[in-house]
Each structure stands twice: as structure tokens, then as C-alpha cells.
């Protein structure tokens, strides 16, 4: 099994589960846009608890009733591909936090979809 290391960027987008853009759930819109732009991948994580400035704390105790927990959307790809989706993120996220940081990706095994991106 071979080890492959490469430098990429990680785009993280923090939004609320109910946040919408043009009538669509924000995290679903961004995930679909990442696929349309042929990015290496996109993962969406639902938080078990969280709060934002000037908002009350949310937990998943009553997740089926509250259903507005924090969502983190994470995309890792090369900087050029990350730059393609940033304008759509800036337009769709009206409340939340967006971060971009450099990461070193270490993969084990055969070639993957990321090969054509880095």
C-alpha cells in the first residue's frame, strides 16, 4: 500500500440546519454546486449541540422538534478548485462562518478521484 501526501485547502462552512438560499436548504445547495463544479468531494456534518453569537444554545435532545442544529460543510481540494465554489458560498451563506485553511492530505492505497485535482 503506497502513501501519497499532497497540499490542499479545506473549505469549512458553518450554517444552521434550516438556513435557506433561494428556497433551498443551504447545505444541500452547496453540496450540489460542489458536484456540478466537479470538486473532489463534499461532506456535511450535523452538530449535536452549538450556539452562535446572540443565539440560544441548541442541542439534539429534541432534534426532531427543533431541527435547527449546526451544520458543517467541508470540502477539501486544491486551491484552484476551492476558488471555484467560493463565490457561490458567499452568495448563499447570509448567516454563518466560512473558513479556508491549508491542509496536508495523506492518502493510503491506489489512485482516487483526488488524483485529477492535485
Image (spheres, rainbow, N blue to C red):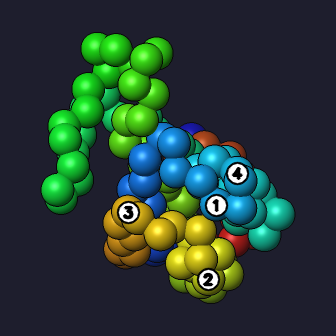
Residue 40 drawn at (x, y percent): 68, 60
Mark 1 vs mark 2, foreground winner is: 1
Query: Left or right of 36: which side holds 66?
Result: left
Q: Which residue is mark 4?
A: 24
Residue 103 seen in render: no
Residue at image mark 3 = 96
Q: Which callout, 4 or 3, points at the residue further toward the start of the chain? A: 4
Instruction: Kindly check if marks 1 and 3 are in contact, taking CB atoms under 8 A apart as contact.
Output: no
What residue is shown at x 41% (from left), y 64% (from top)?
95
Distance of label 1 from label 3 (alpha carbons)? 13 Å
- Nearer to me, 74 or 71: 71
| Closer to us: 93 or 101 | 93
Q: Say which of 11 and 90 sits in front.
A: 90
Q: How far apart, in angstroms, are the residues tagged by discs 4 and 1?
A: 5 Å
Q: Residue at x 46, y 15 (%)?
A: 64
Which of label 1 and label 3 is nearer to you? 1
Residue 111 in percent (x, y) is at: 71, 53
- Using residue 20 as the reference point, say whether residue 34 is left or right of it: right
For the image, the number of numbered tags is 4
Distance between the Cα atoms at labels 4 and 3?
16 Å
Of mark 1 and mark 3, the one earlier in the sequence is 1
Amino acid at each position: 500500500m503506497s502513501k501519497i501526501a499532497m497540499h490542499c485547502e479545506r473549505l469549512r462552512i458553518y450554517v444552521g440546519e434550516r438556513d435557506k438560499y433561494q428556497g433551498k436548504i443551504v447545505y444541500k445547495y452547496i453540496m450540489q454546486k460542489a458536484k456540478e463544479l466537479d470538486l473532489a468531494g463534499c461532506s456535511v456534518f450535523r452538530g449535536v449541540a452549538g450556539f452562535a453569537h446572540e443565539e440560544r444554545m441548541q442541542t439534539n435532545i429534541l432534534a426532531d422538534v427543533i431541527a435547527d442544529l449546526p451544520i458543517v460543510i467541508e470540502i477539501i481540494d486544491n486551491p484552484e478548485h476551492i476558488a471555484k465554489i467560493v463565490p457561490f458560498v458567499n452568495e448563499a451563506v447570509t448567516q454563518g462562518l466560512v473558513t479556508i485553511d491549508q491542509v496536508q492530505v495523506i492518502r493510503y492505497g491506489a489512485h482516487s478521484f483526488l488524483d485529477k485535482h492535485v
